[in-house]
Image (tube, rainbow, N blue to C red):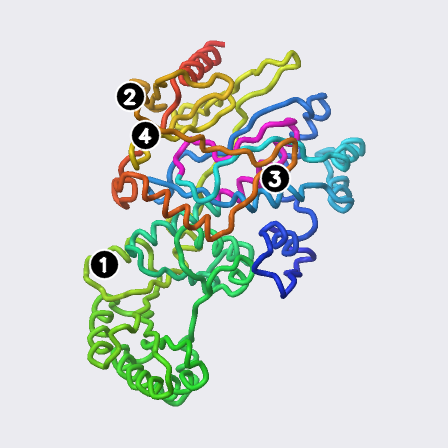
Amino acid sequence: MFFKSQVFILRVEESNFNQLPLMKITRDLYAASLSLLTDLYQLTMAYGYWKAGRSEQEAVFHLFFRKAPFQGGFTIACGLETVIDFLEEFHFTKDDLAYLGSLPGNDGQPLFEPAFLDYLAQMKFSCDIEAIPEGTVVFPHQPLIRVQGPILQAQIIETALLNIINFQTLIATKAARMHIATQGELVLEFGLRRAQGIDGALAASRAAYVGGCDATSNVLAGKLYDIPVRGTHAHSWVMSFDSEMEAFETYAAHMPNNCVFLVDTYDTLEGVRKAVEVGHQLRERGYEMMGVRLDSGDLAYLSIEARKILDEGGFPDAAIVASNDLDEHIVTSLKTQDAKITIWGIGTKLVTAYDQPALGGVYKIAAVRHPEGHWDYKVKLSEQAIKVSNPGILQVRRFKQGNEFVGDMIYNLDKPPVKNPIMLDPMDPTRRKVFGTGFQSEELLVPVFRKGQKVYECPPLKEVKARVAAQLGHFHPGIKRFVNPHTYPVGLEKGLSDDKYDLIMRLRNA
């Protein structure tokens, strides 16, 4: 997102920043209008709808993704609160319209005529929006957001919604995988210095906390989102003194209540021994050394040896913090080697989603209402079955048996499921599941906007984070495997599947 005059702006009342909702934070961080945070073709299509007299025609779009990221078995929905903020503030300013009016077409003439810009100036967001709450475990092809309203408006917000949901969902999922790998031990997000710009860093810190991180090194994110912040000192602190011991003693003298010593500047295990000496000095003053941090070398071996030194030195409760380009696979490997790490600092590979830098979410039209009132369902065809979209006004029903979620059925609200509905695998309709008696169910998409007015109250970020853990607890453990995860059943209600097939055949034979 762009900053006003390319300068980072922050205006937050010091007395109540922890109570500020995200919408106020975003409004203060960025320029008054973000309506131009879009691809040009959204505006050219909007212009085409307006010229054709179709700008107010009702349409339905769905935002979804086709594959779970990181070759995993689940995904964590994230970013809805930022979307709400964007939509509540959605409008075109005079400066926005002046810029659009200056854009030339290929013939050198204005791309947009003044009357269209006048239309945009008067336009007020009036769509209905349903969305899956943040922190929910979601799967491919499920609509995370459904937009219903004037086709011009529904089209023009596509890019921003994808920008927000794609990134935050990706990072929240990566963080959830880190939390699984550490088996519940503390995970600290250390990625600010490697993040993709200021906005990327803030969004990543927020999403990482939602997904499972316990704290961040990003102080601004801590202030804005009320996320715990953690951190001590760097190698430069140690190197600025004549000796490592002097560096530790000076730090302990001035920060006695925050002592985690970085011990690998020169000789790691010798650094641990010095930390133990300074730890005893701290105790004499009534303070306790919190631990040591390892940032290089053989982390399994060094953590095991460091643990011995700490225990023998009288510090069995001192933590061993590890960093150094960690991800869930390295963490898992360290666990199998019986590493004695108890706090994990994850940076670059988390906030940049290093092994998969984009989610690949898409936004597709699924229905258009005719002037006579009936819906005309739409489907995008492709030579690749995974890219064929689902038609209709879609909702997702999650079924539960006992304490376990057992299947998600996508269905058309215009043709709701019958009793004991049948769900078909969209990639193989011969595979089906019947949800008869004994199943509980819930609808995943909930109302967020009605006629452009917000009707949804976003929960505090701590509750969103707790929702992730609670949700994952209701799924078969196999979906959380990093290698060949279990495939959770997600499919189409039989009526929707039949309508989709009929529509595909009609289009292919047209």
Which residue was labeled with disc 3? 39
Which numbered disc, 1 or 2, marks the residue that appears first in the sequence?
1
Give the image quarter of residue 140.
Answer: top left
Residue at horizontal 44%, vertical 14%?
499
Which residue was labeled with disc 2? 431
| Secondary structure category for the residue under label 2 | strand
Give the image quarter of residue 328.
Answer: bottom left
Residue at horizontal 47%, vertical 27%?
395
Residue 504: image location, x then y, percent: 45, 15
Which residue was labeled with disc 1? 335
Which residue was labeled with disc 4? 489
Residue at horizontal 74%, vertical 35%?
120
Q: Amino acid at mark 1?
A: Lys
Residue 165: image location, x then y, percent: 50, 42
| Secondary structure category for the residue under label 1 | helix
Q: Amino acid at mark 4?
A: Pro
Q: Amino acid at mark 3?
A: Asp
**Foreground: disc 1 or disc 3:** 1
User: Image check: 104 left or right of 217?
Assistant: right
Mark 1 Cα shell of 10 Å, populated few (<14), some (14-19), many (≥20): some
Which numbered disc, 1 or 3, marks the residue that appears first in the sequence?
3
Residue 139 in magenta?
yes
Distance CA(mark 2)–CA(mark 3): 39 Å
